[in-house]
């Protein structure tokens, strides 16, 4: 008998389903919360596995835009769409538009820390090497001014991190290596379109990018999360972010 994900989606019907916080949000905790949850387990109380009814249901074969619509937070969605639209309106090529559309994707529903690297890892199996490279390196290049193209140190970073903040050595190394790379300008243009101003009431329809995504993002027929790619598990984590294991 074939069991579709549909059938597997509610294996815990009728039970109370506990959600344990992700370890990365409670590093070095004393174990008290986990012990409390473990103590509540019983015939009618289990840990969450599968669809959380509190979240929008994802389709069986999710596409990139399904994640934009059903998983990513509003601020990240607006920011990615705004960056990509700026690049599109400025007449930049589709490599740059795609890099803008994806550059902070891990902030949408996965993780913020080291977001350039996580974002690149998520999309690398599906985009050109150049797009993945630009997504990864933008994290470091955002800190490196280049007055020759009118890019100064971001005012937003002064507010976020304080005026005395200096990026750590590994990020400085990355930014200077990226500066010499043959794809430097791709990433530099990404950073120029990576703005943090949001106009109230202005929304951009993600469907605007459907054709560009179709030409530049190899959507797996099995759906993101189910194609066995090196990042499939990361997409599944966003589909089922509350799974205990
Ligand atoms: Fe970023
Ligand atoms: Fe950004």
Image (cartoon, helix red, strand yellow):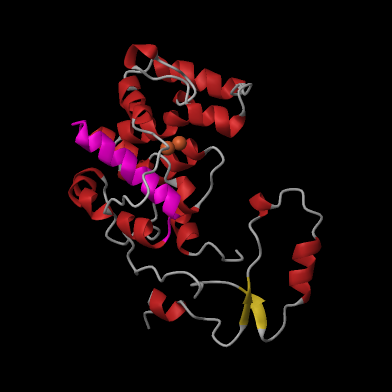
Report the image quarter containing ligand 2: top left
The residue segment tinted magenta is 71-94
Above or below, 122 against 58 in this view is above
Q: Based on the picture, tell me whether residue 213 belongs to the magenta stretch.
A: no
Residue 231 seen: no
**Which residue occupies the extreme front position in the image?**
200
Q: Based on the picture, tell me whether residue 75 belongs to the magenta stretch.
A: yes
Q: Which quadrant does the N terminus fall into?
A: bottom left
- Quadrant of the image occupied by residue 129: top left
**Which residue occupies the extreme top position in the image?**
148
Residue at the image point whose x is 43% and y is 41% from the top: 104
Residue at the image point whose x is 27% and y is 33% from the top: 96
* Majority SS type along the magenta span: helix
Residue at the image point whose x is 43% and y is 19% from the top: 152
Task: Please tell me which residue lies in front, 223 or 33.
Answer: 33
Q: State left or right for residue 70 relative to residue 165.
A: left
Residue 106 seen: yes
Instruction: Count numbered badges in the picture.
Output: 0
- Quadrant of the image occupied by residue 212: top left
Residue 42 screen position, x and y as percent = 72, 83
Above or below, 234 against 150 in this view is below
Q: State left or right for residue 52 relative to residue 76.
A: right
Residue 234 screen position, x and y as percent = 47, 53
Q: State left or right for residue 81 relative to residue 159.
A: left
Residue 243 screen position, x and y as percent = 57, 66
Q: Which quadrant does the C terminus fall into?
A: bottom right
- Quadrant of the image occupied by residue 162: top right
Task: Please tell me which residue lies in front, 51 or 79.
Answer: 79
């Amino acid at each position: 008998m074939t069991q579709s994900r549909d059938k597997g989606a509610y294996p815990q019907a009728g039970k109370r389903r506990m959600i344990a916080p992700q370890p990365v949000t409670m590093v070095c905790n004393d174990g008290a919360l986990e012990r409390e949850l473990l103590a509540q387990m019983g015939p009618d109380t289990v840990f969450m596995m599968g669809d959380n009814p509190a979240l929008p249901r994802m389709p069986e074969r999710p596409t990139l835009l399904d994640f934009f619509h059903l998983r990513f937070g509003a601020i990240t969605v607006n920011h990615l769409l705004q960056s990509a639209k700026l690049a599109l309106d400025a007449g930049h090529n589709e490599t740059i538009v795609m890099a803008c559309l994806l550059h902070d994707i891990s902030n949408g529903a996965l993780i913020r820390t080291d977001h350039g690297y996580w974002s690149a890892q998520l999309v690398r199996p599906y985009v050109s090497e150049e797009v993945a490279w630009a997504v990864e390196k933008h994290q470091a290049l955002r800190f490196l001014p280049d007055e020759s193209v009118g890019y100064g140190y971001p005012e937003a970073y002064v507010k976020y991190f304080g005026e005395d903040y200096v990026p750590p050595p590994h990020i400085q190394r990355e930014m200077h290596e990226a500066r010499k790379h043959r794809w430097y300008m791709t990433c530099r243009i990404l950073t120029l379109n990576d703005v943090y101003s949001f106009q109230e009431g202005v929304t951009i329809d993600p469907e605007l990018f459907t054709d560009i995504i179709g030409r530049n993002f190899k959507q797996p027929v099995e759906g993101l999360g189910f194609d066995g790619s090196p990042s499939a598990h990361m997409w599944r984590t966003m589909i089922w972010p509350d799974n205990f294991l």
